[in-house]
């Protein structure tokens, strides 16, 4: 008979490995969470910049009239008109076409569609609530909208009052 020693990990070795993994996880998980929050803030700022630039460019090429203000034929809803006027070709009157021709030489101002809201309860939405008038824009998180937009002033905000990593509400970006 020969004495064979059993190979494998002892209980102490397993406990030490588990403790080390726990310490690494305790350090890494908060850092990953903070990084993803910061990424959401940066993406929101970028999407707002894209929207604001598109809105201003549209207005500058349409005699100061903002998209959604004068819905083109076939677009009775201002939110659909807003999206069509920014993502399709248009003429000076705001009438849209899917292709560029002599009657529709302007635009498009956004490549494909309205950017997605990446933060807050309505994150993953890209819908726009279009308002008019001189009253300040306010958050309406119950409607499922991503963005709140005023077609008289061209102002657009994120539809979220949640706080960013810096403590600033997303609707104030």
Image (cartoon, rainbow, N blue to C red):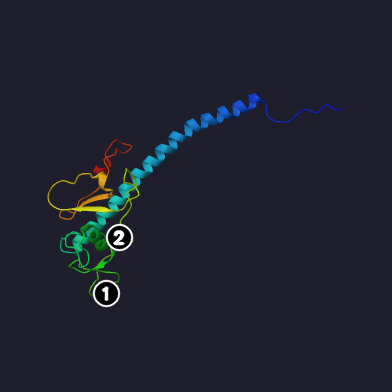
Residue 151 in the image, given as x and y percentages of width and height: 18, 55
Q: Which mark is residue 110?
A: 2
Asked which quadrant contains residue 154, the reply is bottom left
For the N terminus, which image quadrant? top right
Residue that mark 1 sits on:
101
CB of mark 1 within 8 Å of CB of mark 2? no
Residue 44's spot in the image, x, y percent? 32, 47
Q: Quadrant of residue 80?
A: bottom left
List the single residue furthest toward the front. Answer: 142
Say which element carries label 1.
loop
Residue furthest to the top in view is 12
The mark found on residue 79 in the picture is none
Up-down relation of residue 163 to residue 102 (above or below): above
Residue 25 horizontal/vertical position (percent): 50, 33
How far apart, in angstroms, are the residues tagged by discs 1 and 2? 18 Å
Q: Residues within 10 Å of mark 2 (few under 14, many from 20)?
A: some
Mark 2 residue element:
loop
């Amino acid at each position: 008979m020969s004495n064979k020693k059993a190979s494998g990990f002892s209980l102490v070795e397993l406990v030490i490995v588990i403790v080390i993994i726990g310490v690494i996880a305790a350090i890494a998980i908060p850092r990953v969470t903070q990084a993803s929050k910061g990424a959401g803030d940066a993406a929101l700022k970028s999407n707002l910049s894209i929207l604001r630039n598109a809105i201003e460019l549209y207005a500058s090429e349409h005699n100061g009239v903002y998209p959604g203000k004068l819905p083109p034929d076939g677009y009775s809803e201002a939110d659909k008109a807003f999206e069509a006027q920014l993502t399709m070709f248009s003429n000076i009157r705001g009438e849209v076409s899917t292709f560029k021709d002599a009657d529709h030489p302007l635009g498009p101002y956004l490549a494909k569609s309205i950017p997605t809201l990446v933060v807050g309860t309505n994150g993953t939405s890209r819908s726009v609530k279009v308002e008019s008038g001189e009253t300040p824009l306010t958050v309406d998180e119950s409607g499922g909208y991503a963005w709140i937009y005023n077609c008289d002033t061209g102002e657009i905000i994120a539809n979220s009052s949640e706080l960013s990593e810096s403590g600033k509400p997303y609707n104030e970006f």
